[in-house]
Image: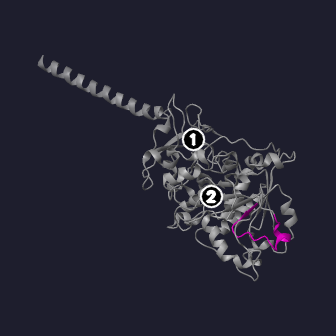
């Protein structure tokens, strides 16, 4: 009897262990299946990739209500639906909190408004992680209904996977929020607000609060003459323009972009005489005034149509812009003054000033001009050249773009600048990758997105 009882207890114990084992197997099988249905935005250390279609670079979507501040929730060009694979990022960029990781996506919960929407590359993440391939997104209807605009053609080219049309090209008062400051202070130089305190940011951008400050072509309604397309000439300072006789052709465009030491007097036959939008940083402006004074460069072009577009590389750009727009002295820094700056004329109005958005500069660096220096100790000083920012800004705002005076494969045949009195070879420095830019101009020309002037 005792033996039977012991055998019964052993049978029950074995049966219990078998049941426990089956339950463990069941849990192990169901957990991964359920994970696929989770909202991955609640797991900042996870990202997902779409196995079947690696070549498509979609804009990620976020769940939530439509933003109340004019932002557009992100849309997806190709929603990942099959074979989702979870990847755990084991490390975070130095100094970045998990909740504010450069690659993190904005998220909302039901009933909340989105304070800032981010465009991110989720199917093809950009590495290394310090790059910050996530951007502010906003709805900005085009100023024209051009039937053959760049934005309508780019999806049919190889650049369709890189191009994001909702990143603001310009920053203005609306963008100076604590939330955006916390996000962008992670990035130094022209790519963020890392060199800028929030008080300087707010006081400067609050000045840029008019329609003209956030539209590249603020006077288009007055000058369009019924045209459906904005046609732009983007003029670099390359030696290829010498004796080109392209001046009249350049001036016939709706808008003419120029940058840095744009010497015009005496060279009108080759480079034209008009300047609609002048791109510069405070540093490049001051350097140009020192370096090219001997050939007639005295400062930014001064005309009724000229607008001044700052490429903000440091707090000195914000300080100079605010002082010039408000006709007050520069508060501090290398340009500190006792009187208001006069670079842009004594009576310049605030409507004449614009400033590139750091997200736009970081975006074109990440997706169009990702130079080798980004893998080196010089990564924080590397950025697209001022001319490159200007040309790519035109490509994102104009309907048609013609580029003149930019580097071409035969660059050794020409001096560095069209106004050089004797031959000077092109200089190469670690903070720009001019050869990569040259290759990009060729590719954009071959894709039909720009028309690049080249000697026949």
Left or right: 25, with 46 as reference point: left
At 53% from the left and 46% from the top, the residue drawn is 180
Q: Is residue 455 visible?
A: no
At 60% from the left and 67% from the top, the residue drawn is 283
Q: Which residues are magenta?
A: 257-273
**Does residue 117 lie above or below 439 as drawn?**
above
Left or right: 18, with 370 as reference point: left
Give the secondary structure at mark 1: loop
Q: Is residue 140 magenta?
A: no
- The percent position of residue 19, horizontal first and vertical second, equals 32, 25
**Residue, disc 1:** 117
**Residue, disc 2:** 327
At 79% from the left and 48% from the top, the residue drawn is 220
The quadrant of the rendering that contains the C terminus is bottom right
Q: Is residue 262 magenta?
A: yes
Left or right: 57, with 24 as reference point: right
**Does residue 292 lie above or below 301 as drawn?**
below
């Amino acid at each position: 009897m005792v033996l039977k009882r012991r055998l019964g207890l052993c049978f029950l114990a074995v049966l219990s262990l078998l049941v426990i084992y089956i339950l463990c197997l069941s849990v192990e099988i169901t957990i991964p299946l359920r994970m696929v249905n989770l909202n991955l935005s609640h797991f900042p250390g996870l990202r997902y990739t779409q196995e079947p279609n690696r070549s498509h670079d979609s804009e990620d979507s976020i769940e939530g209500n439509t933003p109340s501040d004019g932002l557009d929730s992100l849309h997806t060009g190709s929603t990942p639906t099959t074979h989702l694979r979870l990847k755990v990022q084991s490390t975070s960029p130095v100094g970045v909190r998990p909740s504010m990781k450069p690659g993190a996506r904005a998220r909302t919960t039901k009933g909340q408004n989105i304070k800032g929407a981010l465009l991110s590359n989720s199917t093809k993440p950009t590495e290394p992680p310090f790059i910050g391939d996530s951007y502010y997104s906003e709805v900005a209807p085009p100023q024209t209904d051009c039937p053959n605009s760049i934005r309508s053609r780019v999806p049919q080219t190889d650049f369709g996977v890189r191009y994001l049309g909702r990143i603001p090209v310009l920053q203005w008062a609306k963008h100076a929020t604590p939330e955006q400051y916390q996000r962008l202070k992670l990035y130094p130089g022209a790519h963020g607000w890392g060199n800028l305190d929030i008080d300087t940011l707010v006081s400067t951008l609050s000045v840029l609060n008019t329609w003209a400050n956030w539209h590249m072509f603020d006077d288009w309604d007055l000058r369009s003459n019924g045209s459906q397309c904005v046609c732009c000439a983007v003029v670099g300072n390359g030696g290829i323009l010498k004796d080109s006789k392209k001046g009249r052709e350049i001036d016939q465009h709706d808008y003419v972009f120029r940058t840095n030491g744009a010497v015009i007097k005496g060279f009108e036959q080759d480079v034209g005489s008009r300047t609609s939008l002048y791109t510069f940083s405070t540093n490049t402006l001051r350097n140009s005034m020192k370096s090219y004074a001997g050939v007639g460069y005295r400062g930014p072009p001064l005309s009724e149509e000229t607008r001044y577009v700052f490429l903000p590389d440091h707090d000195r750009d914000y300080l100079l812009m605010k002082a010039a727009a408000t006709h007050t002295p520069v508060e501090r820094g290398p340009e500190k003054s006792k009187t208001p700056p006069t670079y842009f004329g004594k009576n310049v109005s605030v409507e004449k000033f614009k400033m590139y958005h750091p997200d736009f500069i970081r975006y074109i660096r990440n997706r169009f001009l990702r130079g080798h220096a980004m893998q080196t100790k010089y990564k924080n000083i590397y950025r697209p050249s001022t001319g490159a920012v200007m040309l790519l800004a035109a490509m994102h705002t104009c309907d048609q773009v013609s580029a003149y005076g930019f580097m071409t494969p035969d660059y050794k045949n020409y001096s560095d600048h069209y106004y050089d009195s004797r031959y000077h070879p092109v200089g190469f420095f670690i903070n720009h990758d001019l050869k990569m830019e040259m290759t990009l101009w060729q590719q954009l020309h071959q894709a039909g997105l720009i028309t690049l002037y080249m000697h026949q």
